Amino acid sequence: MRLFEAKTLLSSRRLFYEFLVDGFTMLEAEKLSWLRKNQKKLKVSKYKNLNDESQQNNVPGSTKGKRFVLPSSYVGGR
């Protein structure tokens, strides 16, 4: 414990909350980045229905971006 050091981050409430939210956001962004880069390791190609659906031209948004699959263990997914 440091006796003569200011506790600026802990004393200023809103700044501390912003620090926590920024840290959480960085962790989630890193998880999503890893999932996006390691789709082959996750064996996404075995989901045949998703691949067949993405090749149809009548799917809205099929021309935008690149699709990647989130595993069921990802928080916020099914």
Image: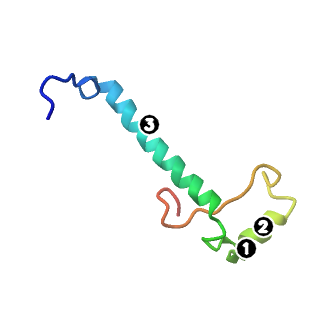
Answer with left or right where residue 56 lies relative to residue 17: right
Q: Secondary structure at mark 1?
A: helix
Q: Which mark is residue 22?
A: 3
What residue is shown at x 55% (from left), y 66% (from top)?
A: 71
Name the residue at 64% across, 59% down.
37
User: Residue at label 1?
Assistant: 49
Residue 78's spot in the image, x, y percent?
A: 53, 64
Q: Is residue 67 above or below residue 29?
A: below
Q: How is the image coloured?
A: rainbow
Q: Residue at x 21, y 22 (%)?
A: 6
Q: Residue at x 63, y 63 (%)?
A: 69
Task: Give the percent coordinates (x, y) of residue 26.
Answer: 48, 43
Mark closer to the chain start, 2 or 3: 3
Instruction: Residue type at mark 3: give it.
Output: Asp
- Horizontal placement of 55 versus 26: left or right? right
Q: Give the alpha-carbon distance from disc 2 to disc 3, as whole Å.
A: 36 Å
Dot 2 alpha-carbon crowd within 10 angstroms: few under 14, some 14 to 19, many 20 or more: few
Residue 77 lies, with reference to residue 9, above or below; the image says below
| 59 or 71: nearer the viewer | 71
Left-right relation of 73 to 58: left
Between the C-alphas of marks 1 and 3, the distance is: 37 Å
Residue position for label 2: 53
User: Do the residues under discs 2 and 1 have CB atoms within 8 angstroms?
Assistant: yes
The crowding category of the residue bearing disc 3, from other C-alpha atoms within 10 Å (few below 14, some 14 to 19, many at least 20), is few
Amino acid at circle 2: Glu
Q: Secondary structure at mark 3?
A: helix
Q: Is tag 1's residue or tag 3's residue first in the polypeptide sequence?
A: 3
Number of numbered callouts drawn = 3
Position in image of residue 50 (x %, y %): 72, 69
